[in-house]
Amino acid sequence: MPKEFSLKRPGVICLLLISATIAGVAQERRSATEKIEWTYSDKTATPNPALPNVLLIGDSITRAYYPAVAEDLAGKANCYYFATSASIGDERLAPQLAEYFKMIHVRFDVVHFNNGMHGWGYTEQEYRRYFPEMLTAVRAGAPRARLVWATVTPVRKDKAGSATNARIDARNAIAEQIVAREKIPVDDQHALMMGHQDLHADDVHFNAEGSRIEAAQVADSILKLIPPRPAATR
């Protein structure tokens, strides 16, 4: 069962200072939190030390496809996930990631990450400005990992003041510009699920079949980045 992850210790100030430097000239930071905020984490029940470790970072959509990804990677990798409602733009996101890496104390070989379905109180300009904070936090916590960015999936129905496909397209475009500069490959979950809009469980999330389709592509994108295992000595 997923484990709720509580964050009560202080944030990592030095990480935020690095992020501010990357973002450029300091600007006043807004807070646009949601009514309900949460974090979850889970991992392979019994990690095999001989296998590589992979981490999925995302939100409730990641939580939905994580079990199927773990099944697809069984015997190939130990699978972990960290999901949060904190969005790019929220100053708590980088400290949450730092706290997770400190808590889990695992060397990750691949990190598959996504963020963009929450935080609709932040503008796309803020999304662009603060995206590097998330990237910095991931790299600080998994310095040897190969990274893959997952695009934000489409919604079935636009909701005023919340998720709309126009804003999702804008956030995906911003993210893809940044990760392209960083030479980070993209798992285009948006394009994949545009072909499966009939598999929505609600206006945002997908049903079990949809999550399974997502998981297959997630697992494939991860397997392409897992370093080859050394041949067994004879």
Image (cartoon, helix red, strand yellow):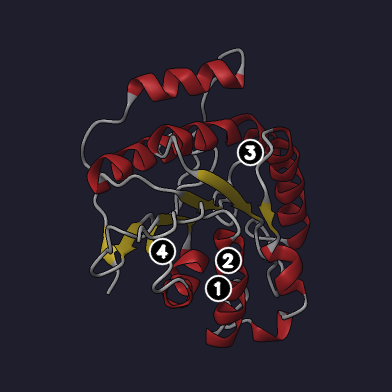
User: Can you identify the residue that label 2 sits on?
Assistant: 218
User: What is the distance, in whole Å, between disc 1 and disc 4 at their CAs?
Assistant: 14 Å
Foreground label between 3 and 2: 2
Foreground label between 1 and 4: 4
Is the residue marked by circle 4 packed among few (<14), some (14-19), or many (20+) residues within 10 Å?
many
User: Can you identify the residue that label 1 sits on?
Assistant: 215
Q: What secondary structure is marked by label 2?
A: helix
Whichever of labels 1 and 3 marks the residue nearer the N terminus, that label is: 3
Q: What secondary structure is marked by label 1?
A: helix
Name the kind of residue labelled 2 in the image.
Val
Q: Position of residue 12 (x, y in %)?
A: 32, 27
Name the kind of residue labelled 4 in the image.
Ala
User: Can you identify the residue that label 3 sits on?
Assistant: 127
Name the kind of residue labelled 1 in the image.
Ala
Q: What secondary structure is marked by label 3?
A: helix
Are discs 1 and 2 less than 8 Å apart at CB?
Answer: yes
Is the residue marked by circle 2 packed among few (<14), some (14-19), or many (20+) residues within 10 Å?
many
Is the residue marked by circle 3 packed among few (<14), some (14-19), or many (20+) residues within 10 Å?
many
Q: Nearer the viewer, residue 200 or 108?
A: 108
Whichever of labels 1 and 4 marks the residue nearer the N terminus, that label is: 4
Whichever of labels 4 and 3 marks the residue nearer the N terminus, that label is: 4
Whichever of labels 4 and 2 marks the residue nearer the N terminus, that label is: 4
Q: Position of residue 13 (x, y in %)?
A: 34, 22
Q: Is residue 94 left or right of residue 220?
A: left
Task: Tell me, yes or no, if residue 127 can be seen here.
Answer: yes
Q: What secondary structure is marked by label 4?
A: loop
User: What is the distance, in whole Å, between disc 1 and disc 3 at their CAs?
Assistant: 26 Å
Whichever of labels 3 and 2 marks the residue nearer the N terminus, that label is: 3
For the point 71% across and 64% down, which residue is it? Answer: 190
Q: Quadrant of residue 16?
A: top left
